[in-house]
Structures are given as structure tokens and as C-alpha cells.
Image (cartoon, rainbow, N blue to C red):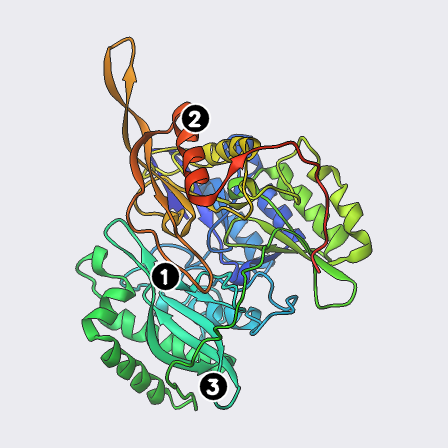
Amino acid sequence: MLHRNKRTPGQFMMRLKVPNGIVNSDQMRFYAKSVEKYGDEGGVVDITTRQNIQLRGVKIEDAPDIIDGFHARNQTSFQSALDNVRNMVGSPLAGIDDKELVDTRELCNAINDLVSLDPETGTRGNPQWGNLPRKFNVAISGSRDDYAHTHINDIGLVPTPHAETGVMGFNVVLGGYMSIKRVAESIDSDMWIPADRNSVVTLTEAILRIFRDEGNRKDRQKARLMWLVEEYGVVEYKAAVVKEVESYDRGVKIENTQPLDDSPFERRSLLGVHKQPQEGKCRVGFLVPSGRLSQAECRTVADLADKYSDGEIRLTVEQNIILPNVDEDKVDELLAEPAFGADTRLKVIVGNIEGNVVSCTGAQFCSLAMIETKSNAESVSKKLEELLDVDREIRIHWTGCPNSCGQVQVADIGIMGAPAKKMDPEKGKAIAVPGCKIFVGGRIGEDAHLALEPYITGIPLAEEDLIPVLVDILKKEFGATDKQPAEEMVVIDE
């Protein structure tokens, strides 16, 4: 539980552990019930950029019952924040993907158990990994799409077959992170391991042990894994990890990085209707604007899951939802549900701008944020969608401060809260107003790239100032054109 006294005195944010981003309808209803008493504005449920869930508005006296409710539903909030291993990110298409290389579900759960299950008591909360030098992020990708964003995680496991044996495994990339002081893309560690539970858990444990005992505890701005790798040197760090793994005597062998498949590949969309390899089944991804769910929307999602996906709900790092294993002959019925009506926020059929917006918590709840992000992100994306056509998905990320919880550096267009001034006609001079700096050109997937320098700065946040700037960027950098009337049609991707 995290407290932001400046914004929500007496109330807390409660973050869960949701390995691989998979929840169910009963859990979703419990989230709504847990925040119901805090009102529609304060009691909301957020999907995070780590496929996770955050409950807003929780009061300390209610926490024990909520925690008990989590544990009764095989969930926990223990070790989900501060200097712990954060939520395990995996493929949202695990087990339902015809291009899958590795099913990430078992591996995400195994690492989650390593770091947050006490081996002596069998209960949640593992003190062995509860006091790291800094927070620690792990992501396991299941396909070439890299839906897990391995390049911005402390440990990123990239699925790659061994060039000689053909055994499926992972190239290991290390040190990706974002902070006020530094934004770093992960680096090749020159390590490859087989994609089995023993190898993945053993490697992770070895890296964590070295980080826990040798990471910087004097300067929190230099305490992430990348700093330790650089202090060692990549070659020397690899040698230390190999030595640590060998000391466990579990039969795990680390080999050199294997060559990646360089044949043409296009990252696939998670939104919309797509056939699964399972005969007669589809996955249906839908937009959750800015990742925020009301209590009523949580219950609606739960009802949809019960009716169409056997209660299963999958979260994405883009803060949206996928219903897996929907019967193909039920898709039209699902799309016609009132939950996806014209006057609702949830949408299956979305435009290339509106469907790809990510947002941090923002100033409503976070005292570090310089601007409100979620409501602005939702409003601005709608207006841009009304104004422009663009021939590919455009990812617009919002973050309230330089900590970049909204990951603006990976976005096509990233909007970060920052100082700005605007002319006040009454005072006859420029005055300070909520503003932003804009980053352009980040990429995800196999060709990942971080946009480290702002494209433009000092833009007032008011829509009459910001939207023209974004329209100009979308036209100049992404080939957007003025919107022409067009009919909507539903296509099931083959």
C-alpha cells in the first residue's frame, strides 16, 4: 500500500501481483467491491504498464479485509512496490498464439513464487528478496512481437532458438529502466538459457542475489541493475552470473547469445478480433481508455468474461484487456453488447490513435505529477481521432513527471509534464501554466528504440494549444491526413 498524503490524505493505493497479467471475473468483481465505498471518483481500478492492477482510495482500516480477500482468490499485494521485484510481465497471448515461441505463463508464475513466496512457511511475502537496493523489473517475451517490452526491464528474456540444437531458449538482455536521472535501454548480456522453468528461475535468482548483495545502497539514483553491470563490465558481469549459477548445482548451463531471426516480421495488434490457433476460437481485445476502470466497468468486464471467455481476463502493458477463447460464432453477439455501445468508454473497434494511448496515474492521485494525465489523455486522443486519419497504429504515452511511469520514451509520441508559459491577455505577460514536453520516435518490438531527447518543449497543456502541435507532428512525422467520413466495418483477422 502506498500513501500520497498531498493528493489523497488518509487513503492509499493498493497494488497487486498479477503474474502474466491474467485475472478472472471473480477477482475483477472483488476489485470493484473493494473500492466501492470510496465513491466513483476516488474508488477506481487502474490497469498498469506492467499488466498489473492498482486499487485507488483504500483506507487503512479496510486493508485487512481486502488483503484477506486477495489471498482467498489466490492473489496478493505483498512485495508489489518499493524495493522489490515488481509484477512479472509476460505475453498476453500466452497459449493462444499461432506465432508463439514460448508460453510465458508458467515461467512468470515461477519467478513470482521465487520472489514473493516464503519457502519456509508457504505464505506470501519472501524476506529474502524484500529489501533490494532498488526496484527490479523482469519481463518474459513469448514471441517476436515482444509484447512484454523486454528492452526496458532489468531482466528481459527474448525467445530465441539455439542455432545448433534448435532448442527453444532466451537471449538475456539486462539493465533497461527509466528514472529522473537516466533512461537506459537494455543491453545484450551475451547469455542464452533454455526456456525451461529450472533455467529461468535459476538465472533470475543468481542475478537477484548478486544485485541484492552488491548493488549500490548509497545513491538511489545509481542503484538500478544497469549501474552494477557497468561497474563490473559486461564480460565480467556475465562471468559472475555464470559462477553464481554453477554454485547452485542445478544443471543449468549458460551459453552465448544466439542469433535472432532476421526474417521480415510485423508486430501484431492486440486490439480487435483475431482468430486463435484453437479451432473455432478468437481473442477479442478492447480499449480501456487510459487504463482506468470504474466500479461499474469492472463488473461489466467480469460479466463479459463469464459469458464469453470462461471468466478469463488478460491485461496488456498498453493498459487494455483481452478476452481469450471466445467462440467464433459468438463474436458478433459480443460486439453487440451494450458494454461496447456508442455511449460507453470500452471499445473493440477503435481508431489507430485512440486505441493506443497509455497514461501514468497523473496529478489526481500522484503528488509527483506536474499534470493530470488520464483524463487529458482520453480527451485528447478522442479529438485527434475525430480530426485525423493515419494508416498505422500510433502510440501516444502520457507521463506526469520525469520518472516516466508512462514510458514516454518508447512511444511514437510521448507527452511528459513540464513547465510552460502562456500569454495572459489581462496581465499582458506570459504566466506559468500546466505544460509538457513532447518526445517523438520511440519504438517497441524487435526494432525497439528509446526517444531520449524531447522533440519540442514548453507546450501549454490546454487543448487549444496542445492539439494543434500534436496534429502538426502527426502529419509531418507519421503521414496523418485530415479525417474523411468513412464507414465502420468489423473484420476478423485470419
Which mark identifies residue 1?
none
Instruction: Name the spot of residue 274 as percent of width and height, x first.
Output: 68, 57
Q: Residue at x 29, y 14 (%)?
A: 424
Instruction: Name the spot of residue 99 as percent of width and height, x first.
Output: 61, 70
* Numbered disc in front, either 2 or 1: 2
On screen, residue 239 versus residue 387, left or right, reads left
Instruction: Name the spot of residue 400 as percent of width and height, x first.
Output: 36, 39
In the depicted structure, whether residue 315 falls above or below residue 186: above
Q: Residue furthest left?
A: 218
Q: Residue at x 54, y 60 (%)?
A: 267
Of the numbered discs 2 and 1, the one sitting upstream in the chain is: 1
Of the numbered discs 1 and 3, the one sitting upstream in the chain is: 1
Q: CA distance from mark 2 to mark 3?
A: 52 Å
Residue designated by label 1: 84
In the depicted structure, whether residue 61 falls above or below residue 235: above
Q: Helix, strand, or loop for circle 2?
A: helix
Which mark identifies residue 163?
3
Foreground residue, 241 or 72?
Answer: 241
Foreground residue, 10 or 275?
Answer: 275
Foreground residue, 207 or 128?
Answer: 207
Type of residue at label 1? Answer: Asn
Q: Residue at x 67, y 35 (%)?
A: 486
Q: Are marks 1 and 3 in contact (CB under 8 Å)?
A: no
Q: Residue furthest right?
A: 329
Mark 1 neighbour class, 10 Å CA radius: few under 14, some 14 to 19, many 20 or more: many
Residue designated by label 2: 463
In the depicted structure, whether residue 321 falls above or below residue 144: above
Type of residue at label 2? Answer: Glu
